[in-house]
Image (cartoon, rainbow, N blue to C red):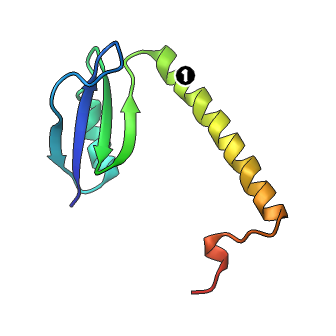
Amino acid sequence: MPAYRTYLIDQTNNISGPAHWTICAGDFDAIEKAKQLVDGHDVELWESDRLVMRFFTTQAKSKELSNMATICTKERLERLFRWKQDGVKALSEYGS
């Protein structure tokens, strides 16, 4: 089972204190546990060097992140579409 760490993030967007370590069956369980730490400060959930999720204390930050994710997804889809037009194959299109 993977080890996850959560960090409390202060108002200046810096880590405020040591990591909280937990062992979970997967991302879903880790996310549920990390949600409990959100209390007046943002929380980041990491598994190894992968940021799993960041939890925000205010709706404004959540909405801003959601808008950024939408923009990133749109840009990613446009890039993938251009690659597809250029004949670049997805990994799944190669036989095993």
Above or below, 90 against 45 in this view is below
Is 28 left, or right, of 79 in this rendering?
Answer: left
Residue 53 image point, x, y percent: 39, 38
Q: Residues within 10 Å of mark 1 (few under 14, many from 20)?
A: few
- Tag 1: residue type? Lys
Pick the front one: 79 or 34: 79
Above or below, 72 against 27 in this view is above
For the N terminus, the quadrant is bottom left
- Residue found at the far right of this picture: 85
Q: Residue at x 42, y 15 (%)?
A: 58
Which residue, given by chain and number where applicable, does mark 1 sit on? 63
- Residue found at the far bottom of this picture: 96
Above or below, 67 against 80 in this view is above
Residue 92 image point, x, y percent: 62, 74
Is 94 left, or right, of 5 in this rendering?
Answer: right
Element type at mark 1: helix
Q: Which residue is drawn at 29% across and 55% down?
A: 26
Is 29 left, or right, of 57 in this rendering?
Answer: left
Residue 25 image point, x, y percent: 24, 57
Quadrant in which residue 83 is drawn: bottom right
Quadrant in which residue 14 is drawn: top left
Q: Residue at x 35, y 13 (%)?
A: 12
Quadrant in which residue 69 is drawn: top right
Residue 68 image point, x, y percent: 59, 30
How many numbered circles does the render carry?
1
Is 11 left, or right, of 82 in this rendering?
Answer: left
For the C terminus, the quadrant is bottom right
